[in-house]
Amino acid sequence: MTWTQEYVPLGSIALSALAAAIPMIIIFYLLAIRRSPGQVAGISALIAAFLVAVLVYKMPLNIAFLAALMGIAYGVFPIFWIVLTAIFIYNMTVETGKFDVIKNSIATITDDRRLQALLIAFAFGAFLEGAAGFGTPVAISAGMLVGLGFNPLYAAGLCLIANTAPVAFGGIGIPIIVAGQVTGIDTMKISQMVGRQLPFISVFIPIWLVVLMSGWKATKEVLPACLVAGISFAVVQFFSANYLGPELPDILSSLASIFSLTFFLQIWKPASIWRFPGEQAGKSKTSVLPTYSTTELVTAWGPFIILTVMVILWGLKPIKAVLDMPTLSIYVPGLHNLVTQVAPIAKAPTAMTAVYKINWLSAAGTALFIASILSAMILGVGPGQFFRILGKTFSQLTKPLITIPAVLGLAYIMNYSGMSSSLGLFLAGSGAFFPFFSAWLGWLGVFLTGSDTSANALFGNLQSVTAQQVGVDPTLTVAANSSGGVTGKMISPQSIAVATAATGLVGKEGDLFSFTVMHSIILAILVGIMTYLQAYALSWMIP
């Protein structure tokens, strides 16, 4: 028997949206105010969502349970699989002493903490986002910063904020491709519109990061480097998004930023070397660092070189098509095609599919696991040590193994019950101000799901339908869903859980949430203002 979603179960969209927001309010309260551990906040919000879905939205008990179970399953695989394998590779380099070589080789470029953050959190993190997405960049780059000596909270927070610039084009452009699929709008037009929004954010994210780390006075010392990193990224992001499509902007932009910044630092140095309070500041200590042979450097960097190559290969469409062939698709009985979406969320009554795909070979985590085997060979890690480090890594991540599935379960209940749609419809009722709130819809979607791709799938059609109703080009609002969504990534419970797992901050999710939440809100406001201006005053920017 099918069940049809009801988006106004309490007779008022405002009251219905307030009821739908209860799980979000709980998770905000527990993380930001009570500073509760992630697993406590995640489980509490999941239980609240289940109760609201069943008691308020009249979702059948068995369907609510299966929706939660499907989300939990996706939290284990592929999301936790990515986190586990990424941190496993990092742990191998630490156990074998090779991360010291990596640290020192980065310090030969610069041992200034501000510039290291630009290279790793911003530029290298963007590369990983473009190649893999789904938690990989934060897991890898935050772990690297901690290994370099960064305060774990700053390492995690900086990587989450830096990840704002590339998220919309992450995973070889999949968020934009999905937005095109659910709305029927040409994917290239959405790519072009996002490419006329995010570059403005990308220019000043490096400056934002450094100000957050060191204050404005210290930022002025490295302002030229910030501008090189940001402008090179933004220019290539604009060009590739507008003329090449959504697949390559992150890859090309990050490489442009890495090479531009590395070259610039060969001919320019800051007046002083900045380090965190408690570290010795002063002149560069690069001259006293040990020197390494080419073989030593290649061996130490080998795991991350292999990781990069594997992630790129796994993202190539012809290879991905072959790797997807053995994917096991499980049509969830009791849920598949038994929940019906109706207007305005869907153009016509549409049965929601419930297919749990075990893409065990094409998953990004599998690429990382194969990279870990190859890395073990070049690092000289034998089978015994390999499995010992893997076991240690798994033990390290037992709490995230609770948190991540819990927040995915929350997202799936809110999606299948119609709670997310109630929140979206409430924002969509803003009339002529909808272009401003369209960015907040994306922000909300990514907060709930941890994924710009999922946010576009969730709210893409609502954005398109509402834009037409208020007389705005739907290409703009669909793009704003993705551009606004990137600002919610840094506070998504899923992202927070990944970041704390990578930096040894498990149990401190509330501290990290508090660290990033204001930045998320400010950036969402900026994207909203930009979208509003593009809707009315700068409509010539819409392709």
Image: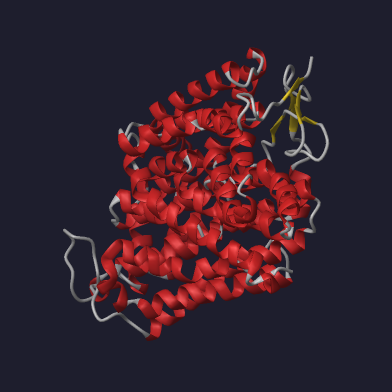
Residue 125 is situated, as x and y percent measured from the top left of the image, at 49, 58
Q: Is residue 512 above or below residue 13?
A: below
Q: Is residue 106 visible?
A: no
Residue 191 is situated, as x and y percent measured from the top left of the image, at 70, 62
Q: Is residue 305 above or below residue 34?
A: below
Instruction: Left or right? Give the position of 410 relative to 288.
Output: right
Q: Nearer the viewer, residue 62 or 402?
A: 62
Outermost residue toward the bottom in this view: 267
Instruction: Left or right? Give the position of 112 relative to 1.
Output: left
Q: Nearer the viewer, residue 238 or 283?
A: 238
Q: Residue at x 66, y 41 (%)?
A: 458
Residue 77 is situated, as x and y percent measured from the top left of the image, at 59, 33
Q: Nearer the viewer, residue 146 or 7?
A: 7
Residue 96 is situated, as x and y percent measured from the top left of the image, at 37, 49
Q: Residue at x 35, y 39 (%)?
A: 32
Q: Is residue 541 visible?
A: yes
How is this picture coloured?
secondary structure
Q: Residue at x 68, y 65 (%)?
A: 193
The quarter of the rendered structure image containing the N terminus is top right
Outermost residue toward the right in this view: 348
The quarter of the rendered structure image containing the C terminus is bottom right
Instruction: Left or right? Give the position of 50 relative to 91.
Output: right
